Amino acid sequence: MKVNDTVANVTRAAHDVGLAAWLGGVMFGKFAHNPSLEKISNHAERGSVSNAAWNGYNPINAAGLGAAALGWGAARLTETNPVRLSGPEKALPRAKDGLMAAAVVTGIANGVQGARLARQAPDGAVPVQTGTEPAADTPPQAARIQRRIAVLGNLNLASGVALVAVNAVLAQMNHSHPAKRRALTRSSSPEYESVRANPRRFAVIGDHAIETTEDIVERHPRYAVVEKHEDVADLAERSNPRRQGKRQSI
């Protein structure tokens, strides 16, 4: 599948901005908002303020996490599809798959528990010590919900930090060690079709040709063009999906 530059850039930007909005909110909540509730003397008022604050940010939280998940899902169907990755490249995307799933599951569960907590008293005025710690006068059911929120919040935060770390490593790998045999799959011009007009020619990232079967014949800023040797030319021509007028991208 060939991906348009604009679509790829917008999707990646949505993923990164969404990840930042979600993780930033989670970290602010844990390390700033929740502890600062102790500055309010009345326990019930603490609960009311906490629930009001999270109800206001939860739509942004959900949108951010959703954008990050959808952006990564789109990437996995196209440019980070396992068939386009070399052996060493496959481990980190798999790890990111697991972390993204954990983030979504714990994020949804946390939101559900937060909504349950807010319903334990009118206007969300549940007596609490902090955002995740019950007070002595917190009703037992609300206290249990708060403890669940604390556990889920920690898991959600840990998955988010790990996601950012994996994202950074993936970006660095793509910059420092481009794939040796990944075809050019993104184009906003006819350049890719121009290369593949010759069934023996392929676009690859950087100068990574397979020396036993192909030679680099052209170099461009984003990719190089390789041409298959005579001994494998027949195979390349027979496997070309553009034969007999077919127009499929590979």
Image (tube, rainbow, N blue to C red):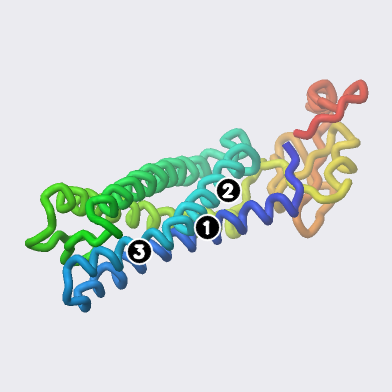
Say if residue 85 shows up in the picture: no
Q: Amino acid at mark 3?
A: Ala
The reply to whether the C-beta atoms of the residues labelled 1 and 2 are less than 8 Å apart is yes
| Residue in the foreground of this view, choosing between 107 and 85 | 107
Where does label 2 land, which residue?
Answer: 71
Quarter the C terminus occupies: top right
Q: Amino acid at mark 1?
A: Gly
Q: CA distance from mark 3 to mark 1?
A: 22 Å
| Spot occupied by residue 56 in the image (x, y as percentages of width and height) | 42, 62
In this picture, residue 240 sits left or right of residue 128: right
Amino acid type assigned to the residue bearing label 2 in the image: Gly
Q: Position of residue 234 (x, y in %)?
A: 83, 23
Sequence-earlier tag: 1 or 2: 1
Q: Badge 1 local density, few (<14 within 10 Å), some, or many (20+)?
A: many
Q: Earlier in the sequence, mark 3 or mark 2?
A: 3
Q: Which mark is residue 18?
A: 1
On residue 237, the disc is none
How far is mark 3 from mark 2, CA to CA? 29 Å
**Residue at the far left in the pictured view:** 136
Note whether 218 is above or below 39 in the view shown: above
Q: Is residue 236 left or right of residue 53?
A: right
Q: Position of residue 86 (x, y in %)?
A: 57, 40
- Mark number displayed over residue 52: 3
Relative to 205, 233 lies left or right: right
